[in-house]
Amino acid sequence: MTTARRIDGKAKAEQLAESITGQTASLLKKHGITPGLAVVIIGEDPASKVYVRNKKRRAEACGFYSVQHTLPANVSQPEVLKLLDDLNHDNAIHGILVQLPLPGHLDEQAITQSISPSKDVDGFHFINIGKLTAGHTADAFVPCTPAGCMLMIEDELGPDLSGLNAVIIGRSNIVGKPMASLLMQRNATITVAHSRTRDLPGVVRNSDIVVAAVGRPNMVKADWVKPGAVIIDVGINRIEETIDGESRSRLTGDVDYDAVCAVAGAITPVPGGVGPMTITMLMFNTLRSARLSAGLED
Ligand code: GUN
């Protein structure tokens, strides 16, 4: 029985972060610019708090100027828009991120679209989505999770995915749709599967690349997987388990990891796979934005 290679997203993210830290120091030395990242968190979602704390830590470790705006769950839409307008005009800030999900009374679309496309390091603005969809990736901010997934896929399979079938499970704006654009640009033949897809196991069985982004613990089973396939698990699900009579919570992905390891060629673990890469790609986008603001790229 073979065992899949474990794709070490944490190690790859560390390596990339080191390079970003070096480039940040050189940007300051040569041009007097420090990349600035503003993260806005609204309300008390516990998972969001953890993600935002990790983003701030990583930004500081890279040598960025990092600010966090913590707004109460009942903040009004105009107050949020006013803050974003201020950040859009703040020359010390090159990247703005509003952590999702937002409390129900806020208009997510109006908020994400009010961030200047040139500071939209999440890649959620329609201008950036349009550029990515049209294949102008060099000119767009690419959403962080799909960008990180692509780097790991490229490590395994090289830059050209001609002749390979890829399935993306999940059609979200944050992961599924941009992932489809990126894989298509690399010549993969793509299927975007979702809750209405017929015979998902059959679709997965035909795929050389599987990107699972649905948020359903251990959904992708070993007998769905084509031998040798590359499996990217975007899911981060907290599940409760009882071990020796004690209830514990742990993180698990959308893929039945242990069983799939026996069939796949390579697989990302959860935690330690896609998550760290996502955060590092945010730093990559912020550094790029700072460089662009100084006329240094593109
Ligand atoms: N919530 C979950 N993932 C993301 C992300 O990539 N960006 C933002 N802003 N919020 C998120």
Image (tube, rainbow, N blue to C red):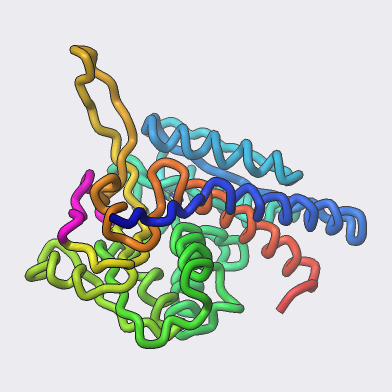
Question: Which is more toward the observer, 201 or 55?
Answer: 201
Q: Residue at x 48, y 39 (%)?
A: 51
Q: Is residue 240 shown left or right of residue 202?
A: right
Q: Position of residue 97 (x, y in %)?
A: 53, 51
Quarter assignment of residue 145: bottom left
Q: Residue at x 63, y 41 (%)?
A: 58
Q: Nearer the viewer, residue 74 or 220?
A: 220
Looking at the rendered image, the quarter that the C terminus falls into is bottom right
Query: Along the horizontal axis of the image, is 62 left or right of 158?
Result: right
Q: Is residue 174 visible?
A: no
Residue 175, above or below 215: below
126 vs 61, left or right, is left
Q: Position of residue 213 (x, y in %)?
A: 30, 57
Q: Identify whether 168 is placed above or below 273.
A: below
* Residue 221 is inside the magenta segment: yes
Q: Quadrant of the N terminus?
A: bottom left
Residue 286's image quarter?
A: bottom right
Q: Which residues are magenta?
A: 213-223
Q: Is residue 111 magenta?
A: no
Residue 270 is left or right of residue 8, and the answer is: left
